[in-house]
Image (tube, rainbow, N blue to C red):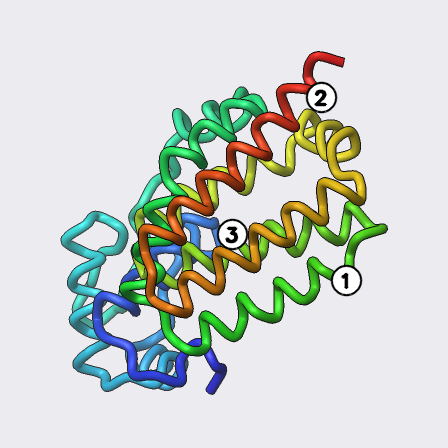
Amino acid sequence: MTAQFEQKLGATDIAALVRREISKGNLQLHDRLPPERVLSERYGAARGTVRKALMQLEEEGFVEIRPGSGTYVVHKPDDTAASAVENATPLELMDTRFALEPHICRLAVLHGRRADFDLLETLCTRMENCLGDPMAFSEADTAFHRALVDSTRNGLLIWIIDQIGNVRGQDDWTRMRHLTLDEATITTYNAQHRQILNAIRTREPERAANIMKEHLETARLSLTRAAAT
């Protein structure tokens, strides 16, 4: 069993994980989910817990349980969301992150587990070893912010951050990354990431949220200056 599932997962946790796979397109419309027995083994949970998770997903309109046949994906991708992602600018991305990520830090304090914090620690160390490699830093940075939202166990927030991650794959974002990620900027970001993690570990939600605000303000200012060049 992976570290992600070392602690027993409840029905809500399993529903969030399956929902994320559907939202990411790993499970697509009309796909049949693995049997309850397989899901039970995958997530280290009782079959009754898995069944409750599937029933929750059915109520939300993500799957349909067909007795004697199996559970099938019925969720249709939202073209409006895809269009918003395609047309978003790097500055719009930063404004959206500013609206969400400080509170994600608060939720990480409430719901984060030791395995989550250990992963964040590993990613902080990885970023600190990337002073001369903006591409590797950006990949670790994306993973750090994604690990933060994963620690909230909030399926909707995880989906939203996934969409933001898609924006970061756009050409405009790649160009901005090359313009802004010099050694001094990466050093500043690393210090802020480390302070965020320390505040989360010591269970200080408002301190973590405020440092995240400072971090995003720094990043937004850097992008604004780059856009003006």
**Image coords of residue 143 (percent x, y):** 58, 56
Under circle 3, the secondary element is helix
Residue 59 seen anywhere in this rendered image of the structure: yes
Give the mark nearer the N terminus: 1 vs 3: 1
Under circle 2, the secondary element is helix
Look at label 3 and name its amino acid.
His
Give the mark nearer the N terminus: 1 vs 2: 1
Report the residue marked by disc 3: 145
Relative to 184, residue 227 above or below: above
In front of the other: 57 or 140: 140
The mark closer to the camera, 1 or 3, is: 1
Mark number, residue 129: 1
**Which residue extends farthest right?**
132
Distance in Å between CA atoms under marks 1 and 2: 24 Å
Q: Residue at x 62, y 64 (%)?
A: 123
Q: Give neighbour class at mark 1: few <14, some 14-19, many 20+ (Cα, 10 Å).
A: few
In the rendered image, which quarter contains the C terminus?
A: top right
Look at label 2 and name its amino acid.
Ala
- Left or right: 191 as drawn, with respect to 161: right
Q: Residue at x 48, y 56 (%)?
A: 196
Give the mark nearer the N terminus: 3 vs 2: 3
Under circle 1, the secondary element is loop
**Which residue extends farthest top?**
228
Distance in Å between CA atoms under marks 1 and 3: 17 Å
Distance in Å between CA atoms under marks 3 and 2: 22 Å
Look at label 1 and name its amino acid.
Asn
**Image coords of residue 26 (percent x, y):** 49, 56
Report the residue marked by disc 2: 226
Relative to 10, residue 33 above or below: above
- Check contact, mark 1 vs mark 2: CB within 8 A: no
Relative to 86, residue 40 above or below: below
Q: Give neighbour class at mark 2: few <14, some 14-19, many 20+ (Cα, 10 Å).
A: some
